[in-house]
Image: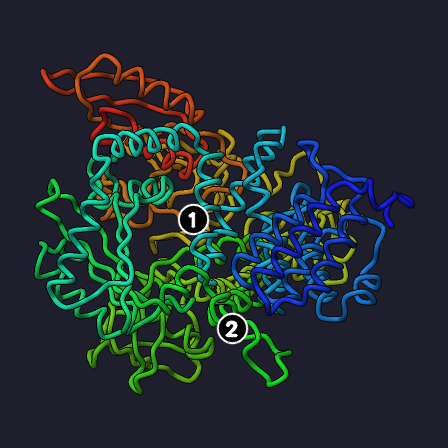
């Protein structure tokens, strides 16, 4: 017993834990009551000396996690794991103790969850990307590990307000929104996903959450009976067509779902057409389509809103018909309707827990099912050279809307919307993607950057010896394709830089009358902080080191006061957009000036300016342009001013923001709103709540509305997007745009 021989009667939470175990066993006869009760007792005893941040006995947390999973009718091993998931991590008990008391299956699951918990503990001092890599590898072994982890995260988010440090709360909420909510969606746990998103949104953007919540409350008060009236109207329409619906249920969409649509569609709350959603559940699959026809016959269809996930289910097994209609008799309400059978509804509500698919595989149930999306994530891990690539590409893979396409043989593939033939080729096989040289879409040769549409038939054209083109990174959208292409591009770039660096060093030796010998370079590795000669060559070829700097480190006696090392000159520019001539050594020496902190792709000392026409901010695509005075001006890639340089492509430089080092930048916004006194106060308050400093404000007034041009200081593109979305949520604001060059 942890913490000494505490009498059973005084063990905090023991009575409640055992009561939960008995309730769970009563509710689901398939559970092994003895195992669940023993797990509850063991966990309560182990955590007897511990308390949560709010002062409650610690056992309250494992019981809550187990209760969440019990609602999904999961098996005995999973419920027991939920009760025991913190025992090995937080008490003196070992994994061997768990195996001895509860068997190998529970011990293995507890071990998997424990490893994930240890990863999270490290998140304050290690890269989130590396932690994500470990998480995905652990989850790929048994999907039940993820189920317990998601329930654990959900309860932690429900009690997040007890965490005293705001930065810790924000970090947890951001990680939940980026990683755990999409993972919940991928295994079909819609309720998990929705609650995780809303709890995270409330913590990260309280101002916007409160604004949307207030408007939803106002709408409910203004039209208290509207949802009930529409439910009744839909049921009557179905009855007239001979369909007896099992259930017709309406609801308002969640604040985060509304917020996300406001950002995606670049509209205000009032402009959204589907704040209400209705679910129709029928007996048979065929009735879904009859019900769809009945609704389309009775109501005006909203174009572009129909989706058939019955014939082409989502990767997590979700099936339903989605459509958007206007109900004219009910104040012209625009609504979303989802039509599905009871079996489809079970999958939609409970995901993989609805049909116990985690044990599909071998007859003995020991081999967990491998999901296509999980295979894609594991492949990203294998291909990524940099942990940061894992984080970036995995988020791309998790946050997707989908299209369904076919091979010439009729095999179905699911891809994110915006995917291209290259993405399809890599989804078929990494070797097919590497050697792709063209593609036929519906029998016609199409550009490789052409976005695919639902129902397209794709034939990939390959060639022996074909190689990935780094330019593909400009248009592919799947994390798997990006990871594979980037890996090849990095290897090719390293090889190129290595050759150029070796040649530059050899030339520097010859200029000083020395025969180049690699053995002379070995003493220079340590002072230049290079692990190998290959690393040294790459550093010189990429411009990080000058060749004469290497020469002086290898032969110190050559260093003299009159020499000007190449480290003070501008190295050869890399990856330029144009194909013009390179700068000469004299020109490189003339380029001196301000520090280029925040921009990668230019050597230290390069003078830079940020274009006032488009006001680029960290995180968005940028390009550098050489000015007459040899300074570099940084523009957004979509800046219209770049058209003026189309005739001189040699002036373009490929640059990007340096990771984590860019300072805040100024962005210009145009806001249109009603001309009322409180509107301006609301805008400035919202900007302050988003921690966006206002640098300038100009107002043009008209009788009924005002046009505001404001300059706000932002950290990065995500910060800017959050500010714009928050402004759109302000009362009286009907348009927010970014001023473009």
Secondary element under disc 2, as helix, strand or loop, is helix
Secondary element under disc 1, as helix, strand or loop, is helix
Residue 403 location in percent, x, y? 30, 66
How far apart, in angstroms, are the residues tagged by discs 1 and 2? Answer: 22 Å
Q: Name the residue under label 1.
A: 194
Looking at this view, is 547 or 392 the one in front? 392
Image vertical order of residue 724 relative to residue 75, above or below: above
Residue 696 location in percent, x, y? 32, 17
Q: Which residue lies furthest to the front in this view?
A: 26
Give the quadrant of residue 579: bottom left
| Relative horizontal placement of residue 248, taking residue 199 as reference (left or right) | left
Q: In which quarter of the image is the C terminus?
A: top left
Q: Residue furthest top?
A: 677
Q: Residue 412 carries which label?
A: none
Give the quadrant of residue 587: top left
| Relative horizontal placement of residue 171, taking residue 616 as reference (left or right) | right
Image vertical order of residue 595 relative to residue 297, above or below: above
Looking at this view, is 534 or 465 the one in front? 465
| Relative horizontal placement of residue 484, taking residue 69 as reference (left or right) | left
Looking at this view, is 625 or 180 the one in front? 180
The disc, 1 or 2, on the residue closer to the chain's N-terminal end is 1
Looking at this view, is 386 or 274 the one in front? 274
Q: Name the residue under label 2.
A: 357
Residue 631 location in percent, x, y? 40, 34
Q: Residue at x 33, y 23 (%)?
A: 711
């Amino acid at each position: 017993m942890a913490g000494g021989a505490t009498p059973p009667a005084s063990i905090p939470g023991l009575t409640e834990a055992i009561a939960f175990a008995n309730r769970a066993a009563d509710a689901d006869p398939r559970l092994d009551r003895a195992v669940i009760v023993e797990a509850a007792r063991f966990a309560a005893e182990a955590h007897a000396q511990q308390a949560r941040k709010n002062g409650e006995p610690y056992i309250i947390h494992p019981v809550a996690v187990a209760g969440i999973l019990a609602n999904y009718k999961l098996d005995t091993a999973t419920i027991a794991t939920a009760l025991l998931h913190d025992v090995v991590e937080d008490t003196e008990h070992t994994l061997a103790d768990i195996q001895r008391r509860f068997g190998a299956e529970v011990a293995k699951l507890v071990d998997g969850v424990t490893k994930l918990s240890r990863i999270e503990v490290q998140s304050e001092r290690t890269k989130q990307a590396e932690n994500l890599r470990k998480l995905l590898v652990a989850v790929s072994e048994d999907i039940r590990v993820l189920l317990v982890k998601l329930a654990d995260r959900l309860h932690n988010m429900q009690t997040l307000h007890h965490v005293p440090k705001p930065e810790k709360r924000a970090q947890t909420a951001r990680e939940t929104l980026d990683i755990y909510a999409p993972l919940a969606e991928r295994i079909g746990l819609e309720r998990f996903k929705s609650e995780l998103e809303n709890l995270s949104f409330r913590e990260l953007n309280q101002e916007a959450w409160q604004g949307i919540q207030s408007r939803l409350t106002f709408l409910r008060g203004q039209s208290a009976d509207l949802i009930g009236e529409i439910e009744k109207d839909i049921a009557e329409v179905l009855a007239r067509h001979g369909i007896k619906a099992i259930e017709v249920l309406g609801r308002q969409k969640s604040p985060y779902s509304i917020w996300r649509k406001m950002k995606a569609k670049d509209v205000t709350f009032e402009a959204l057409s589907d704040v209400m959603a209705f679910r129709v559940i029928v007996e048979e699959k065929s009735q879904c389509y009859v019900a769809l026809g009945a609704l389309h016959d009775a109501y005006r269809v909203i174009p572009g809103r129909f989706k058939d996930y019955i014939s082409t289910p989502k990767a997590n097994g979700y099936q339903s018909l989605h459509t958007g209609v206007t109900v004219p008799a009910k104040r012209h309400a625009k609504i979303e309707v989802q039509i599905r059978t009871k079996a489809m509804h079970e999958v939609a509500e409970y995901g993989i827990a609805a049909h116990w698919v985690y044990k599909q595989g071998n007859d003995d149930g020991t081999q967990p099912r491998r999901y296509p999306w999980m295979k894609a994530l594991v492949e990203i891990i294998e291909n990524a050279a940099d942990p940061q690539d894992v984080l970036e590409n995995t988020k791309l893979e998790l946050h997707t809307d989908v299209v369904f396409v076919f091979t010439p043989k009729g095999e179905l593939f699911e891809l994110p919307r915006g995917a291209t033939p290259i993405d399809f080729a890599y989804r078929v096989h990494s070797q097919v993607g590497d050697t792709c040289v063209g593609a036929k879409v519906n029998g016609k040769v199409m550009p490789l950057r052409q976005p695919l549409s639902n129902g397209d038939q794709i034939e990939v054209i390959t060639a022996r010896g074909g190689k990935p083109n780094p330019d593909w990174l400009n248009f592919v959208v799947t994390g798997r394709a990006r990871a594979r292409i980037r890996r090849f591009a990095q290897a090719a770039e390293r090889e190129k830089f290595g050759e150029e660096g070796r040649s530059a060093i050899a030339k520097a030796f010859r200029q000083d009358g020395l025969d180049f010998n690699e053995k002379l370079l070995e003493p220079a590795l340590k002072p230049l902080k290079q692990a190998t000669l290959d690393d040294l060559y790459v550093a010189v070829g990429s411009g990080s080191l000058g060749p004469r700097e290497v020469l002086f480190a290898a032969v110190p006696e050559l260093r003299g006061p009159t020499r000007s090392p190449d480290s003070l000159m501008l190295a050869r520019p890399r990856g330029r957009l144009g194909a013009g001539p390179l700068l000469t050594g004299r020109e490189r020496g003339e380029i001196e000036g301000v520090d280029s902190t925040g921009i990668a792709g230019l050597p230290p000392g390069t003078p830079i300016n940020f274009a006032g026409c488009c006001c680029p901010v960290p995180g968005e695509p940028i390009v550098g342009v050489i000015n007459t005075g040899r300074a570099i001006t940084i523009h957004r890639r979509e800046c219209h001013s770049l058209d003026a340089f189309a005739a001189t492509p040699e002036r373009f430089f490929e640059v990007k923001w340096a990771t984590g080092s860019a300072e805040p930048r100024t962005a210009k916004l145009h806001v249109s709103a009603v001309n009322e006194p409180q509107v301006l106060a609301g805008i400035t308050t919202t900007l302050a709540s988003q921690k966006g400093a206002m640098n300038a404000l100009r107002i043009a007034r008209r009788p009924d509305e005002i046009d505001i041009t404001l300059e706000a200081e932002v950290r990065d593109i995500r910060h800017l997007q959050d500010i714009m979305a928050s402004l759109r949520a302000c009362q009286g604001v009907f348009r927010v745009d970014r001023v473009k060059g």
